[in-house]
Image (spheres, helix red, strand yellow):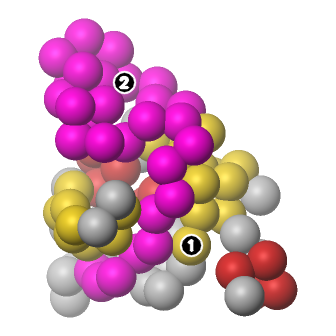
Amino acid sequence: MICSIRQLGVHDKATVTSITAAGEMGRRLRDMGLVPGTEIEIVGRAPLKDPVALRLRGFTLTLRNNEADFIHVDKRDALDAE
């Protein structure tokens, strides 16, 4: 299922499929390691759902929801994650 990171819940795992942000924001997201093929896991959300913390490439990254909306992922089903 293709969706944005904002639509994932805590403990969901997914693979980045595309970054739709252009310009400086797009470059910054890619510089942080968010490139197609990267495996991510949502590790937490603030009480008001913003920001979101995700785990990728051995580190935890926190993004605001307006940044997460530009990152499209393929969510893994529970059976695929095992």
Rendered location of residue 60, percent (x, y): 21, 69
* Image quadrant occupied by the N terminus: bottom right
At mark 1, the secondary structure is strand
> Residue drawn at (20%, 88%), measured in percent from left and top?
47
Q: Is residue 3 above or below residue 47?
A: above
Q: Is residue 73 above or below residue 80?
A: above
Residue 30, quarter of picture = top left
> Residue drawn at (59%, 54%), measured in percent from left and top?
15
Residue type at mark 1? Answer: Lys
* Image quadrant occupied by the C terminus: bottom right
Decide which of 34, 50 is in the foreground and name it.
34
Q: CA distance from mark 1 to mark 2?
A: 21 Å
Residue type at mark 2? Answer: Ala
Label 1 neighbour load within 10 Å: few <14, some 14-19, many 20+ = many
Badge 1 vs badge 2, beta-carbon distance below 8 Å:
no
The residue singled out by tag 2 in the image is 21
Q: Is residue 11 magenta?
A: no
Q: Is residue 23 visible?
A: yes
Rendered location of residue 62, percent (x, y): 18, 63
The residue singled out by tag 1 in the image is 13
Rendered location of residue 69, percent (x, y): 41, 45
Query: Which range is magenta?
Result: 18-45
Count of marks, rendered view = 2
Q: Is residue 7 visible?
A: no
- Frontmost of labels 1 and 2 is 1
